[in-house]
Amino acid sequence: MKRWLLAAWLPLVGAMPAAGAEVSSLTVFAAADLGFAFKEIVPRFEKALGAKVSLVLGSSGNLATQIEHGAPAHVFFSADQAFVDRLAQRGAVIAQTRAVYAEGRIVLATAKSFGSRLTDLRQLGEARILHVAIANPLHAPYGRAAEEVLRKVGLWEIVKPKLVYGENIRHALQFIQSGAAEAGIVALSVANVPDVEWTLIDPGLHAPLVQAAAVVKRTPRPELGLAFIQFVNGPEGRPIMKRYGFRLPGEF
């Protein structure tokens, strides 16, 4: 990131609103795999900066399309850096604010109500598995990674008739939690819930899920959007992100 940009904005970022002043607001469009981590990070940011954050979660592809068509987002956190790069090329985000914030991982998840935990992808082909949940590969990076894994291990044609598609990775997880799917391939960051068991999938079976963020160009307070990106990548946000299973910049 260019030093002149940071030098110009950081003094503004540190300024707290005066008593009686209107609280600054920030709308963050974020990939659904960030739901649990951001539930912890957002309140800390609000307290530190005196700002109010509205969090909109969804699939990265759908959120990117909405931003491109004028959706009122101030910051975009994508589960695939390619969506941020596309928006930068089209002038929808401020390219100088682009920052990688994580690399995601995927797991083979099983509903505890189903019985024994699945430990091998080949088990998805067994007759006892009737439904397999993944996020929609057309616009969800984790769904695309799931499809890539299934193709790599030669299971795509076997498992394809069993697939149920979530609009995003949290939706796919809900299929498993509700019993609508016996198993699925979801993000590690959302898999640590009481009613789900999981087994980590070899990251060598799919392209790296490198995740990036940027400030949306039309935002009235770009310095506040940049502050949120830095907060996620800073000493407050990094331990939380790591706890939810993300690999962090400097680790990959």
Image (spheres, rainbow, N blue to C red):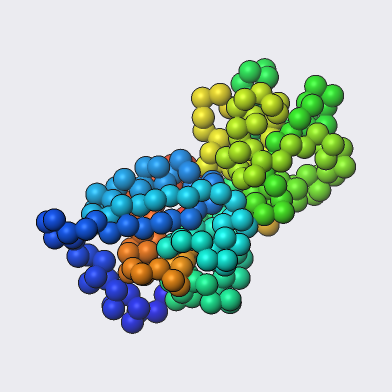
State the residue lying farthest toward the bottom. 4
State the residue lying farthest toward the left. 19
* Coordinates of residue 97 in the picture (x, y in percent): 43, 71
Q: Please say whether residue 119 is visible from this viewpoint.
A: no
User: What residue do we see at 70% from left, 47% from top?
Assistant: 136
Does residue 217 appear to the left or right of 184 in the view shown?
left
Q: Nearer the viewer, residue 68 or 237?
A: 68
Q: Nearer the viewer, residue 227 or 22?
A: 22
**Residue 15 occupies which quadrant of the picture?**
bottom left
* Coordinates of residue 83 in the picture (x, y in percent): 60, 64
* Coordinates of residue 224 in the picture (x, y in percent): 32, 64
Where is the N terminus found, in terms of image quarters?
bottom left
Q: Please say whether residue 167 is visible from this viewpoint.
A: yes
User: What residue do we see at 63% from left, 18% from top?
Assistant: 113
Does residue 233 appear to the left or right of 199 in the view shown?
left
Report the number of discs: 0
User: What residue do we see at 61% from left, 35% from top?
Assistant: 173
Q: Nearer the viewer, residue 119 or 24?
A: 24
State the residue lying farthest toward the right. 157
- Give the answer, above or below, for where 171 lies relative to 203: above
* Coordinates of residue 24 in the picture (x, y in percent): 28, 59
User: What residue do we see at 87% from left, 42% from top?
Assistant: 157
- Give the answer, above or below, for where 128 lies relative to 200: above
- Give the answer, above or below, for where 97 lies relative to 44: below
**Residue 132 occupies which quadrant of the picture?**
top right
Does residue 64 appear to the left or right of 117 in the view shown?
left
